[in-house]
Amino acid sequence: MYHLRQFVEAGGLIFYGADYVEAFQQGAVLVDKILKGAKPADLPVEQPWRFALAINLKTGKALAEYEAAYFGVNATVRDYARFGMLLANDGALDGRQIIPAGWVRAATTPPAKQSQPGQTNSFLGYGYQIWIVPGKERQFMLRGLRGQGVFVDPKSKLVMVHTAAGDVGDPGMGERIAL
């Protein structure tokens, strides 16, 4: 995952980050205010509020012949939470469908009996790279190798992010997941 769109345009797979055109426009507005006499110290600090996602389909198709079990993503806690909320809303954001709802539903639903919670050598079930939490309501989580996780409860729109990393095979990991 790249932080600049230019990497994807040059052949990289995925970009996610601030919309730089909008950020520069915000900067121009601030410069205009300063040129008209505003004191920089009196202006509010503004952070980007619109983010962009770009996927290079040519690179994706080239990689499609390879099966990957997992990959690393380096993101902020807020970005992990935003991704969790995107999944909680079945792939929609601000009224726009970003990820097909059918795919999100399929990814967060066990595809077969052997993938149901309690049938996977774990109390969790398994979807498409997503762990299914047992219970009456649809709940699921993304899990990292070292205990990191994004828990999602679509009904209540609750997303919890855990980024602290433990040892691989840490016996306390199951207890943290159960919480």
Image: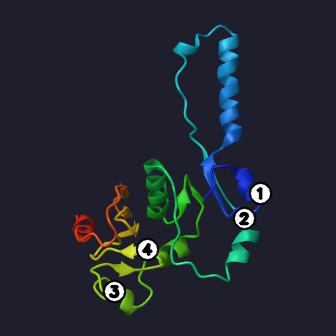
Under mark 2, the amino acid is Asn
Could you tell me residue 8's position as x and y percent?
A: 72, 58
Q: Report crowding for label 3: few under 14, some 14 to 19, many 20 or more residues within 10 A (C-alpha).
A: few
Residue beneath label 1, please? 9
Residue beneath label 2, please? 56
Under mark 1, the amino acid is Glu
Camera-nearest residue between 111 and 178 = 178
- The numbered mark, 4 or 3, whose residue comes first in the sequence reads 3
Residue beneath label 4, please? 130
Under mark 4, the amino acid is Ile
Q: Report crowding for label 1: few under 14, some 14 to 19, many 20 or more residues within 10 A (C-alpha).
A: some
Q: How far apart are marks 1 and 3 (CA)?
A: 40 Å
* In this rendering, the label closer to the viewer, 4 or 1: 1
Tell which residue pokes out farthest to the front in this image.
167
Residue beneath label 3, please? 120
Q: Distance between the residues labelled 4 and 1?
A: 29 Å
What residue is shown at x 43% (from left), y 73% (from top)? Answer: 130
Under mark 3, the amino acid is Thr
- Proximity of marks 2 and 1: CB atoms separated by less than 8 Å: yes
